[in-house]
Image: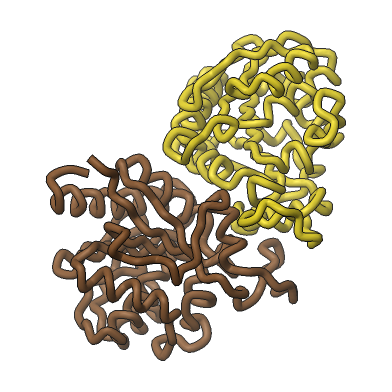
Chain colours: A brown, B yellow
Amino acid sequence: MQQKRVGVVLAGCGYLDGAEITEAVLTLYFLERAGLQPRCFAPDRPQMHVVDHLTGEPTGETRNILVESARIARGKVEPLDRARMEELDALVLPGGFGVAKNLSDFAVRGPEADVDTELVRLVGEALSRGKPLVAICISPAILAAVLRKLGIGGARLTIGDDAGTAAALTALGARHEACTVDRAVVDERLRIVSTPAYMLGPGPRDVGAGIEQAIATLAGWLREATGAV
Amino acid sequence: MQQKRVGVVLAGCGYLDGAEITEAVLTLYFLERAGLQPRCFAPDRPQMHVVDHLTGEPTGETRNILVESARIARGKVEPLDRARMEELDALVLPGGFGVAKNLSDFAVRGPEADVDTELVRLVGEALSRGKPLVAICISPAILAAVLRKLGIGGARLTIGDDAGTAAALTALGARHEACTVDRAVVDERLRIVSTPAYMLGPGPRDVGAGIEQAIATLAGWLREATGAV
C-alpha cells in the first residue's frame, strides 16, 4: 500500500517572522509516526521582514521564505506554486507569525487580510476533492480568510481562547470554539481539524499533545478513505 | 519536588551551519515529557558561516549563533558562558554541523579539533560532579575531543556507523560502538548516553526514537539521584 502524502506549508523558520519551528517539527514527526509521508512547500519570495528572536526587533536583513523553510525541512522543500492536491492526500498548515506575515497579511490587516493566491488555490483544491486539512496555532484564522474567499461559511475552528483573534474568525464567517492546548477541534463536515498550539503554549509537551491529536484525527480520516493508511 | 533542570547547548538554527533543528526540538519535547526542565544556551558570537539550506552553498551572510539559536528556543536562550553545572542537573548536546563548525572546529580539523572553551569547562563541571551528559548525532565526536582534553579515556560513545567519524572518536581515546538510529549507547561509568540521530536518519520518526530512548536513560539517572524526577 502506497503511503499517503501530506503537504505541509512552511512560512519560514522562526516564530516571529516565519514558521513556528516546534510546531513544524512536531507536525513532521507525528505525520511520520502515523505512517504518513510529509512533503514540504513554501513560497519562493522574500519574507515580510526578519526579526531578531532574542530582542524581538526587526533587523533590516532580507531572507527568502523558501530558503529559510529549507532549514526545517533539511533542504526538502518545494515552491508552493508547484503543490497540487491531486498529488497529495491532505494539507497541514503549521503556525507562527510567518503565516500572518508571509502567507497572508493578517498580521497587518486582521479580518480584511489577503492570502497568498497559491495557498487559496491549494485549499480550494483540497476542499473540492474532500481532502482533509489541519490548521495549527494562528493558521485557522488564515484558513477562515480563505474559506470566506471561497464562499464557505460556518467552519468550526479554534485558535485557543484569544478574544481578538476569535472575533476575527467570526467576522470571517467561521464558528470559533474555545479549546485547550492539548486538544483539537474537529469539523467533520469540511474535514478540518485545528489546535491552538503556541496561541496558548507554554511549551513543546503541551503543544505536542494537541498536534498529536490533530494528526491522529487526520490519520483516521485517511484510513477511512481507503481502509488503511 | 523541584523539577530537574537540563542544559541544552544549541549551535545555531539549521543542520548545515547550526543546530540540527529536528534534533533540538525533539530534545526539548522529550525532556518536557519526562518532567525535566530544559534551559537553552548558545555561544554569543558569529557563526563560522551561513549556508543556503536549499542549495547547500555558503551565502556570505553573517549571523550570530545565540541569535539564531533563539529561533528554536523562542527567545529563551542564554549565552553559553553563563551556564554553570551547579545550577543544572544534566547537559544535552544536540547535533548538526554547527557543533562541528561553531562549538568546535571538528569540521575542519577532525580529531585535532579545538573545542569552545566554555563547552570544555561545562562538560568538565558535569563530569566532576557526576552529572549526566547526552550527546546526539555528531556531538559525541566533539565530546570525545573534550574528554581527551580532560584526560578521560575509554568513554563508550556512538555516532552510528560512519567509519571515518568512528575512527576520529577512537583516535581521541573513546571506544566507538555501532548503533542504529532508533537506539542509544550508554556509558554507565561516565553517565554519558549517545544516539546517532541524523548521522543515520532518515527522518523525524527514527531520529525521534533514538532521542526518546536517550532522554529516557537520562531521566532514569536523574530519578536515581534523588528518588524522583
How far from the left and from the top, in percent, is residue A44? 56, 70
Residue A204's place in the image compared with A14, above or below, is: above
Q: Is residue A15 left or right of residue A111?
A: right
Q: Is residue A30 left or right of residue B75?
A: left
Residue placed at 37% from the left, 43% from the top? A32
Q: Nearer the viewer, residue B227 or B110?
A: B110
Q: Position of residue B36 (x, y in %)?
A: 52, 36
Whether residue A206 is visible: no
The answer to which of A123 and B117 lies nearer the viewer is A123
- The residue under the point 78% across, 12% down is B173
- Figure disc tally: 0
Q: Is residue A187 above or below residue B21?
A: below
* Direction bottom: furthest residue: A112
Q: Is residue A23 above or below residue A1?
A: below
The answer to whether residue B160 is left or right of residue A164 is right
Does residue A86 appear anywhere in the picture? yes
Q: Return the x and y of residue A79 as percentages of the image width and height.
A: 50, 66
* Percent position of residue B136, x then y: 61, 31
